Image (tube, rainbow, N blue to C red):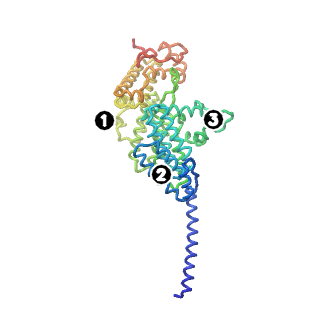
């Protein structure tokens, strides 16, 4: 080949390579921008040597992050979580888009470090710090990150919402105080006040909601319309909110989303809705001037819809979701029955028969198919099942429902029915207390209030809010109460002592 021609050919190939690289570089830069990977965050608060090294090495900051991550992993294996927090903080500043560091650091704060303390308030500070890390900092640099949204929703659902931590009541109380300061006591004008604040006080509250708690009232209203009504003073509502935000973020960044991550977000939604159904209503205990938990029966249709949608979204786990859905429907019928909502109970009882006709309704009773058993027989059999295996929230909801149904029967001069239901409530209360009596710590963590307190709370609610005046007057007369009862403290002498006389009992 002619040497000159050969040189020209090489020069041409070089020019084409440069042009190709330039085009490829532009495409890569565009993709990095689309995926949010081209943002730079200045490193602050690190030792001078680390800061200087970072500036000097520039693009090699990833290598520094890897070295720190290896060291942090060693600290975690040795349960040195406090030291790991500082290292993880530096890593997030070096690589703010490294999702795993945000997740591990927040988890250590909320789960590993918090349990090192005995004082519930100390624990709460670390749980809150973990939430703030994800919500205020992690999402600031990764607004469309599904995993950060999922983890944040999980903290509300599991760490705060469940009762596995001895300090769970403190978590719920402290979070409730923050939400009450913003939302008040959830009046009927809550959404109007938040969406169109007309007073300086409401504008100040809205500022706290959006700037401190990072919650958008427009999104909250959308969540409430779609999944509610939910009780925003309880952590389950926030779990649903952040899961919903994660699902919306995934729509904006669909190219970088693992479909399995979306399934976990949907799972948070329907699991949190299930918990909201069981104990998602706050009931004012006037006798003790505090709030108690009760079931939120208003969201039963939407909880069922959420389960059915989950079956469509997650066909691989359809069988498991169907089982959870059927168990929820069994609970829904039972709760409605015990809360004297017989027509609604009948409606959902028929729905179970239509949806799961070949599944037994009662445990260990093969002849309890929906077509073989009546609603009343199911309720009686279910009570026996529940007395054998009660959780705290279910136990309290069942006992409240039995007492409410009992007082309703008494107001209608059905004294025998009243006594029978009250005795069932006593049996359920005693069965649950006997089950948890083995360990003293269980009593503090998941123990029930005295039966007398539960009865008084239910009675106050029925007399002052639920019963028509005529029925309330009859009930007061039956119980020997004055026409205008005022909340009274419960009897301290006996955990099952009565605050109101029971007809037929000495």
Q: Residues within 10 Å of mark 2 (few under 14, many from 20)?
A: some
Q: Nearer the viewer, residue 104 or 70?
A: 70
Q: On the image, which quarter does residue 428 sit in?
A: top left
Question: Residue 226, position in %: x, y?
Answer: 54, 42
Kindly report which numbered mark, 1 or 3, lies closer to the viewer in this rendering.
3
Q: Is 75 displayed left or right of 209 in the figure? A: left
Whether residue 414 is situated above or below residue 67 in the rendered picture: above
Q: Residue furthest top?
A: 506
Residue denoted by label 3: 205
Q: CA distance from mark 1 to mark 3?
A: 53 Å
Q: Residues within 10 Å of mark 3 (few under 14, many from 20)?
A: many
Q: CA distance from mark 3 to mark 2?
A: 41 Å
Q: What residue lies at 54% left-to-right and 54% top-to-bottom?
A: 253
Q: Could one spot residue 29 in this view of the protein?
A: yes
Q: Nearer the viewer, residue 295 or 91?
A: 91
Q: On the image, which quarter does residue 8 sit in?
A: bottom right
Residue denoted by label 2: 68
Tag 3's secondary structure?
helix
Tag 2's secondary structure?
helix
Badge count: 3
N-terminal of the pair, mark 1 or mark 3, is 3
Q: Nearer the viewer, residue 312 or 489?
A: 489
Residue denoted by label 1: 364
N-terminal of the pair, mark 3 or mark 2, is 2
Kindly report which numbered mark, 1 or 2, lies closer to the viewer in this rendering.
2
Tag 1's secondary structure?
loop
């Amino acid at each position: 080949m002619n040497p000159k021609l050969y040189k020209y050919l090489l020069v041409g190939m070089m020019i084409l390579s440069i042009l190709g690289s330039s085009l490829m570089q532009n495409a890569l830069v565009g993709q990095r921008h689309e995926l949010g990977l081209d943002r730079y965050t200045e490193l602050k608060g690190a030792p001078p040597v680390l800061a200087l090294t970072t500036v000097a090495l520039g693009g090699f900051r990833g290598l520094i992050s890897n070295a720190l991550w290896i060291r942090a992993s060693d600290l975690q294996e040795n349960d040195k979580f406090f030291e790991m927090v500082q290292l993880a903080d530096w890593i997030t500043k070096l690589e703010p888009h490294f999702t795993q560091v945000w997740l591990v650091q927040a988890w250590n704060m909320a789960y590993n470090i918090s349990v090192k303390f005995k004082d519930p308030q100390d624990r709460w500070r670390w749980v809150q710090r973990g939430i703030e890390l994800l919500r205020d900092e992690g999402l600031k640099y990764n607004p469309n990150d599904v995993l950060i949204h999922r983890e944040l929703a999980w903290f509300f659902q599991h760490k705060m919402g469940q009762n596995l931590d001895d300090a769970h009541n403190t978590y719920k109380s402290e979070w409730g105080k923050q939400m009450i300061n913003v939302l008040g006591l959830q009046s009927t004008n809550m959404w109007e006040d938040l969406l169109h604040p007309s007073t300086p006080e409401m504008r100040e509250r809205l500022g706290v909601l959006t700037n401190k708690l990072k919650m958008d009232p427009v999104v909250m209203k959308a969540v409430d319309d779609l999944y509610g009504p939910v009780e925003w003073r309880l952590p389950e509502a926030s779990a649903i909110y952040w899961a919903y935000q994660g699902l919306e973020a995934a729509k904006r960044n669909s190219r970088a989303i693992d479909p399995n991550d979306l399934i976990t977000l949907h799972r948070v939604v329907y699991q949190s809705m299930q918990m909201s159904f069981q104990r998602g209503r706050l009931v004012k205990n006037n006798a003790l001037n505090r709030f108690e938990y009760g079931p939120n029966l208003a969201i039963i249709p939407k909880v069922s819809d959420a389960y059915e949608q989950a079956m469509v979204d997650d066909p691989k786990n359809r069988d498991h979701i169907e089982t959870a859905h059927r168990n929820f429907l069994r609970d829904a019928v039972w709760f409605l029955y015990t809360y004297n909502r017989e027509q609604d109970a009948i409606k959902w009882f028929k729905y179970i028969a239509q949806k799961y006709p070949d599944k037994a309704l009662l445990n260990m009773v093969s002849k309890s198919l929906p077509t073989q058993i009546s609603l009343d027989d199911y309720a009686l059999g279910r009570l026996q099942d529940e007395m054998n295996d009660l959780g705290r929230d279910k136990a309290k909801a069942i006992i409240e429902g039995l007492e409410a149904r009992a007082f309703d029967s008494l107001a209608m001069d059905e004294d025998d029915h009243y006594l029978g239901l009250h005795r069932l409530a006593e049996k359920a209360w005693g069965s649950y207390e006997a089950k948890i009596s083995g360990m003293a710590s269980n009593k503090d963590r998941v123990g029930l209030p005295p039966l007398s307190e539960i009865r008084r709370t239910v009675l106050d609610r029925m007399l002052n809010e639920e019963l028509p005046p005529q029925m309330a007057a009859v009930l007061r007369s039956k119980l020997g109460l004055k026409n205008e009862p005022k909340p009274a403290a419960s009897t301290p002498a006996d955990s099952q002592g009565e605050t109101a006389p029971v007809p037929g009992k000495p």
